[in-house]
Image (cartoon, grey):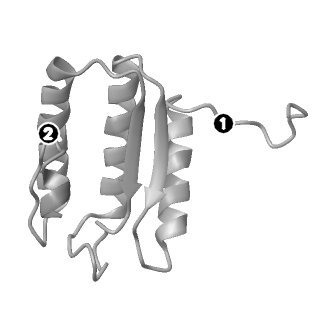
Amino acid sequence: DHFAKKAIDNCVELCSGTEDKTYLDKLDEALGRARTEFSPDLIIYNAGTDILNGDGLGQMKISPLGVQQRDEVVFEFAKAMKAPIVMLTSGGYQKNNAEIIADSISNLASKNLILARNEDSTDA
């Protein structure tokens, strides 16, 4: 990670045990800085779920609702910046991660932050 840090322009350090409020506050601060420092043509969003409470690798205490809120904040940021966004799911080593990710994506669709394709659609 020390090598990777050299390429990070907007570093946010988090400690083990970080909970929703602290995590989301730091995200807001970082996106506030990014708003003034960057004009992205594309946002590549690494939406890891190893931050969830109980994940042995991530060692944070983020709730499923915290993941939804995080994703919503990032997609709102992309919308405000008028930048397309690619969401990469990653990390997360618990049985319920897929369900939490699906719930978050459904939340994004319900808030019109992503386009949801109708299952009955004949568009290819």
Foreground of the two, 1 or 55? 1
Foreground of the two, 117 or 31? 31
Seen at 31% across and 78% down, the residue is: 55
Q: Is residue 3 left or right of residue 117?
A: left
The amino acid pointed to by label 2 is: Asn
Q: Where does label 2 land, which residue?
A: 10
Category of crowding for the residue at label 1, using alpha-carbon neighbours closer than 10 angstroms: few (below 14), some (14–19), many (at least 20) = few
Category of crowding for the residue at label 2, using alpha-carbon neighbours closer than 10 angstroms: few (below 14), some (14–19), many (at least 20) = few
Q: Where does label 1 land, which residue?
A: 116
The amino acid pointed to by label 1 is: Ala
What percent of the width, then of the height, locates residue 111?
A: 49, 32
Instruction: Examine the image and state in which quarter residue 90 appears.
Output: bottom left
Q: Is residue 104 left or right of residue 54?
A: right
Seen at 53% across and 28% down, the residue is: 112
Say if 30 sits above or below 70 in the image. Answer: above
Seen at 53% across and 47% down, the residue is: 105
What percent of the width, then of the height, locates residue 119?
A: 81, 43
